[in-house]
Amino acid sequence: MEFYRSHVLVCTGTGCTSSDSRLLISGLRKELKDRGLEKEIQVIETGCFGFCNLGPIMVVYPEGVFYCRVKEADLKELVEEHFVKGRVVQRLLYREPGATVKTQEFNNIEFFKHQKRIALANCGIINPEKIEEYIARDGYFALAKVLHEMTPAGVIEELKKAGLRGRGGGGFPTGMKWDFAYKAKGDQKYVVCNADEGDPGAFMDRSVLEGDPHAVIEAMAIAGYAIGANQGFIYVRAEYPIAVERLQLAIQQAHDLGLLGKNIFGMGFDFDLDIRLGAGAFVCGEETALLTSIEGKRGEPRPRPPFPANSGLWGKPTIINNVETYANVPHIIRNGWEWFASIGTEKSKGTKVFALAGKIKNTGLIEVPMGTTLRTIVYDIGGGILNDKKFKAAQTGGPSGGCLSAELLDTPIDYDNLIAVGSMMGSGGLIVMDEDTCMVDIARFFLEFTQDESCGKCPPCRIGTKRMLEILTRITEGKGTPEDLNNLEILAKTIKSAALCGLGQTAPNPVLSTLRYFRHEYEAHIYDKKCPAGVCKALLSYQIDPEKCRGCGLCARNCPTKAISGKIKETFVIDAEKCIKCGACMEKCKFGAISKG
């Protein structure tokens, strides 16, 4: 066994890979070899640390020094200073928003201090391509425990007591779902993992699969034992090449060690896994559409009942959970239901992973206890709003969720509280918006997405979302009428009650929530023909303030349509007929002389 004095963990998730972290790793290994340090310093490729906007990320243990935005050009200095002279490279450390001193240790960074990692426990800690590292973190101990010490009914009871609910959006009790399939009659049963992550801005499942694929494999084997299934399928979108590659490798490694396949742990239990690639259809995130796609047919939802637990894949009893749900299962089995149930709120146990994005200083992947307030997420973990602007809204639950206003910043984030305020947990996308966001345009954007992704099978979704989108488009173009607001609400409520699947039923949520909390913006678009945020181009006009204009001509030189005229050292003017409202003039003006209204 080799012993190293330092371990250097470098992220190779999708985000850091796009920032050339793999080149960084090869360069670091070469530099260490050139200095004769390759047997003293081990470089480990990991999954996502979560702090995505700081990549490539490098953490050095045992010190726990957190380096961010490391480039190849930094490597010579880094090796010389840190690994030869034992001095931390201060310029590569992270500085908290508003702080004057940089933070050295990984555990002292505010972004991480407010988190509790269960589903993400191994992400950024282990090399996901080595099964031995997963086993060293107690991997497959839960599978061994259920096979040697627990009955199928006992496993299901453990999940029921733990209070684990589905993390894919619906929040259905996981133990209850497994119990339905366990009791269902069938000569063949299936376990399915929904890794078809289609929400804009969401990358939770991708990061777990890239950083800890064995956790999902182990959990699916446990699920197979619990319900009496010997075959599982992981349905993952083809746009996740790193996740797919690591899943394939992990499945092969589990086979090689006898953790998948025949007679696992010598206990007479057989279980195998296959991967099915999705083509990127948003509707295939709905469980019955996903099953139809696995069967080789066009991904369209099926009427329910019967539910998949009784008649799912090829008409056989099937359980479907998403990646994050499965990632919690081994921890519950190893640590006991009491441990898991002690985290979170009364009706929402455990933690939730969110993809934090939008107009916020710290973007990335976070995991917090259920019940954590939106304020804590935005300001303590997220570091506040970009450029210190005002918080306006947060979109939770992706296209199927709703927008929460500033008055709801102290809302505890859990299943029931979000539904009560007109949103939903969803799979975990959380997009933050500032004062420059038009909420009517946001509602139009999300509805345009769901309308475009509608499978078209049921008329309420196919036709209803199209009519709603037409109304929203008219309003953003300044052509809306007072009747449009009433018609939007009628259409939204009709679609929610009549659409075939959950995606169609939740498609109107962004419209209903923005009407509820930002109705004044809709009214400004309709009655005043103004966009308060200055986003909707049809309602915009740009003016030059003659008192502030210095006559430099910079605006005119940057106008793509030559809509600005004037003489140097005199006031310039904008021709509204030629202006395409691109905003280039306002962006370039150094004196704040140009405004929009």
Image (tube, rainbow, N blue to C red):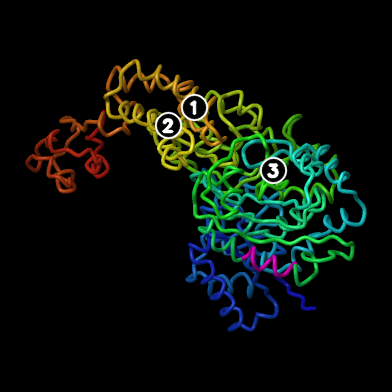
State the CA–CA distance, disc 2 to disc 3: 30 Å
Indicate the secondary structure of the residue bearing disc 1.
helix
Q: Are marks 3 and 1 in contact (CB under 8 Å)?
A: no
Dot 1 alpha-carbon crowd within 10 angstroms: few under 14, some 14 to 19, many 20 or more: many
Q: Where residue 236 appears, x then y in whole percent? A: 58, 55
Q: Residue at x 77, y 64 (%)?
A: 260
Q: Is residue 372 above or below residue 219?
A: above
Whichever of callouts 2 and 1 sits on the residue coming sooner in the sequence is: 2
Q: Is residue 78 above or below residue 217?
A: below
Q: Which residue type carries mark 2?
A: Thr
Q: Residue at x 69, y 40 (%)?
A: 166
Pointer 1 residue? 495
- Left/right placement of residue 32 relative to residue 531 reads right
Q: Is residue 489 above or below residue 219?
A: above
In the picture, the disc for residue 311 is 3
In the picture, the disc for residue 42 is none
Residue closer to the observer: 419 or 303? 303
Q: Which residue type carries mark 1?
A: Ile
Dot 3 alpha-carbon crowd within 10 angstroms: few under 14, some 14 to 19, many 20 or more: many
Asked whether 275 falls inside the magenta stretch, the response is no
Is residue 362 something one can see in this rendering? no
Q: Where residue 336 appears, x then y in whole percent? A: 86, 45
Q: Where residue 28 appears, x then y in whole percent? A: 57, 74
Indicate the secondary structure of the residue bearing disc 3.
loop
Pointer 2 residue? 465
State the CA–CA distance, disc 3 to disc 1: 26 Å
Q: Are marks 2 and 1 in contact (CB under 8 Å)?
A: yes
